[in-house]
Amino acid sequence: MDFEGTKAYYSEIKRENICNCVYCQNLIDEIKQSYPDVAEYLLSFGVNIERPFEVFLPSDPIDGYMDYWGVQYLIVGDCSDFQDTKVGDISIFVTEHHPTATYEGEYFVIEAGTFHIKCRYDRYNFE
């Protein structure tokens, strides 16, 4: 794994580069404050939890929350030193199923979930 390379990758990604659908934007608004331990763990690899590589559509809102089953993040380098783990109730593992990245160089993708995220009805109209 390449911490500096991963950190540099995420420093280039701005919020406007992320999918602008209400589900992805809601996740970005809430994930770091809802899961600070996961944010800190991912940051140890250079990953910004608020800049997902891919987000799977969440469940329908129930009681003001949605479950995001899978959120993916790109890490620069090879995965030989990465170990699947759990941070609290969030599973984090290397996945082979992800979109092709535009990143040029060696990378792998991790997936984390399930995140139980508050719906920001004050900002978004969920249908």
Image (cartoon, rainbow, N blue to C red):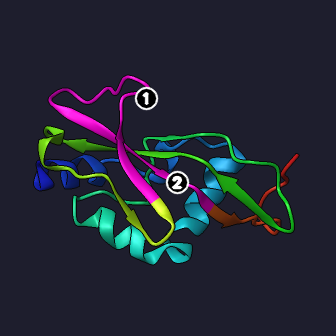
Residue 14 appears left or right of 76: right
Quick check: is 105 in the magenta stretch?
yes
Of residue 18 and residue 27, the one placed in the foreground of this image is: 27
Q: Earlier in the sequence, mark 1 or mark 2?
A: 1
Q: What is the secondary structure assignment of the residue under circle 2?
A: strand
Q: Quadrant of residue 102?
A: top left
Residue named by callout 2: 113
**Where is residue 71 drawn, in percent x and y?**
50, 47
- For image coordinates 62% across by 43% down, the residue present is 20
- For image coordinates 26% across by 36% down, the residue present is 108
- For image coordinates 45% across by 56% down, the residue present is 91
Q: Quadrant of residue 47?
A: bottom left
Is 104 located above or below residue 75 in the figure? above
Residue named by callout 1: 98
The magenta segment is 91-115
Q: The C terminus lies in which quarter of the figure?
A: top right
Q: How many numbered circles does the render carry? A: 2
**Where is residue 62 drawn, in percent x and y?**
85, 61
> What is the three-letter code of the residue carrying label 2?
Gly
Q: What is the secondary structure assignment of the residue under circle 1?
A: loop
- How packed mark 1 is, by other alpha carbons closer than 10 Å (few <14, some 14-19, many 20 or more), is some
Quick check: is 123 in the magenta stretch?
no
> What is the three-letter code of the residue carrying label 1?
His
Q: CA distance from mark 1 to mark 2?
A: 15 Å
